[in-house]
Image (tube, rainbow, N blue to C red):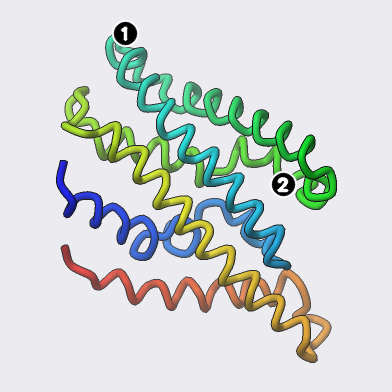
Amino acid sequence: MNLQEFLTIFISAVFVYNVILSRFLGLCSFIAISKETKPALAMSSAVMFVIVSSSALTWFVYRFLLLPLNLSYLRTISFILVIATFVQLVEMIIKKVSPQLYRAFGIYLPLITVNCAVLGVAVLNADMFFINGKAVAGSFYYSVFQGVCVGLGYTLAMLLMSGIRERLELCNVPKPLKDFPLAFIIASVLSLSFMGFSGFKF
């Protein structure tokens, strides 16, 4: 483990391979929840909690259960079960702490279970930090840190999108472009702008 590895993971996960704007994962919640900043930030916090927690747990499941028993082909279903458990936990906490926020999320909160961004990080960790069925040195820390960085990248994309959409609510937008059509145009422009980071060399 060294600082350069962590820096590389941070820049890659947040900017170069942003989970939403470069990998195009988790677009459902990105488009639906990003109308206002407060729900977008709350959704980002929930997704980050699930990503970081599932990154840690899926590492243990993969390292100490699936690989020793030669069950790596069950990786995807195992990871989904871990993610579903954490989503239920987050859902119960939000419902108890803030019923209004729970109602604002609607169906999108349970959909974190099948949010491909969360599952994608777990699979990416297994692909990146395990070589020939063995964990690389410091793989657990790399996996958890990558979960944190992907969550930060998700949050960055959500806040950028919600900020732009809130400002556009004050503008005279043509009726055919309101809501989702305009949201997809904004997402396209943001994605193109993030492509500029792909020229970075490490």
Depth check: give the residue in front, 140 or 108: 140
Q: Residue lying farthest front?
A: 97
Look at the numbered disc 2 and give the secondary structure of its residue.
helix
Relative to 102, 49 lies left or right = left
Which residue is disc 2 drawn over?
108
Depth check: give the residue in front, 143 or 117: 143
Q: Residues within 10 Å of mark 1 (few under 14, many from 20)?
A: few
Kindly report the distance in space between the C-alpha atoms of the residues bearing marks 1 and 2.
Answer: 35 Å
Depth check: give the residue in front, 172 or 181: 172
Q: Residue lying farthest top?
A: 69
Please state the horizontal and vertical placement of residue 40, each as a whole percent of the image: 66, 59
Please state the horizontal and vertical placement of residue 184, each as a whole percent of the image: 63, 71
Depth check: give the residue in front, 81 or 139: 139
What residue sits 16% from the left and 63% below the top? 202
What residue sits 66% from the left and 62% below the top? 31
The disc, 1 or 2, on the residue closer to the chain's N-terminal end is 1
Front tag of 1 and 2: 2
What residue sits 19% from the left and 50% below the top? 5
Q: How many marks?
A: 2
Which residue is disc 1 drawn over?
69
Q: Amino acid at mark 2?
A: Tyr
Q: Residues within 10 Å of mark 2 (few under 14, many from 20)?
A: some
**Placement of 29 over or under 65, stated as above or below:** below
Look at the numbered disc 1 and give the secondary structure of its residue.
loop
Relative to 197, 155 lies left or right = right
Q: Quadrant of the N terminus?
A: top left
**Placement of 113 over or under 24, stated as above or below:** above
**Placement of 156 over or under 142, stated as above or below:** below
Q: Amino acid at mark 1?
A: Leu
Asked if one can make out residue 46 in the rendered structure from this viewpoint, the answer is: yes
Please state the horizontal and vertical placement of residue 99, each as a whole percent of the image: 83, 43
